Each structure stands twice: as structure tokens, then as C-alpha cells.
Image (cartoon, rainbow, N blue to C red):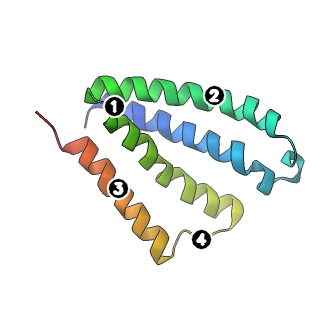
Amino acid sequence: MDIELIKACCLYGVAQALVFFQIHSQFIWKWWEGKPFHAAFIYGIPAGICFWYATKIAFAAMDEVWGPRFLGFCMSYLTFPVLTWYLMNETPFNTKTLLCVFLSFCIVSIQLFWKTS
């Protein structure tokens, strides 16, 4: 795997974690209730920058826009279950969720390892 794709995956992972906190902090900590603008500025701006650079790096490595799109989507299946389990006590270990995680790994693998022309 190309080191640039690893960088893109890391940036996508950070961005997805920031978005998780932007959206779900209101349910985790009472202080965040009713503060959507605080959450948008504190988490949204760095998340947007991470997504922007991750997409730029992934596009340069893959030379297509669909690959980075699926890569960003699938990285959320690495961050969301872990953060939801750890911070919100919701288990990702049920058949439906595990199957979705498995399928997201399949999609990432296809994008990373299936070379087109």
C-alpha cells in the first residue's frame, strides 16, 4: 500500500472522529446540549480541513474521485463503532453492525488493491 494512502486514511480517521464529537457531544456531555455553533466551530473547521487534505492526497494517489469518496466513507466504520462503544456504551457487536463493518472493509480493500488500467 502506498504511504500516501496511509496518510489519507489517517486524515480521514481524524476527520471522522472530529465529526463524531461535533454531532454526538450533545449526548455524551450535558455541557454541549444546545451549543451547535460551538461544536461547528470547534470541531467542524478542523474536520473540514482534514477531509480536504485527505481527499487531495487520496486523489493524487488513486487518480480518481470515487476512490477517495469510498475511502472516506469506510474510515467512518473504523472510528464510529469504537467511539460509540467507548463513549456512549452502545455495542457494535451485533450481527447487523458487524456485517456492515465487514462490508466496509471489503469496499476499502477493493479501492486500495484493485488497480484499474
Q: Residue at x 56, y 54 (%)?
A: 80
Q: Position of residue 109 (x, y in %)?
A: 27, 50
Q: Residue at x 41, y 32 (%)?
A: 8
Marks 3/4: CA–CA distance: 19 Å
Residue labelled with disc 4:
91
Q: Is residue 85 left or right of residue 2?
A: right
Kind of residue at badge 4: Thr
Question: In what quadrant of the picture does the C terminus appear?
Answer: top left
Q: Residue furthest front?
A: 66
Instruction: Place residue 21 in its image quadrant.
Output: top right
Along the polypeptide, which appears first: circle 1 or circle 2?
Answer: 2
Marks 1/3: CA–CA distance: 19 Å
Marks 3/2: CA–CA distance: 26 Å
Dot 2 alpha-carbon crowd within 10 angstroms: few under 14, some 14 to 19, many 20 or more: some
Choose between 37 and 15: the one closer to the eye.
37
Dot 4 alpha-carbon crowd within 10 angstroms: few under 14, some 14 to 19, many 20 or more: few
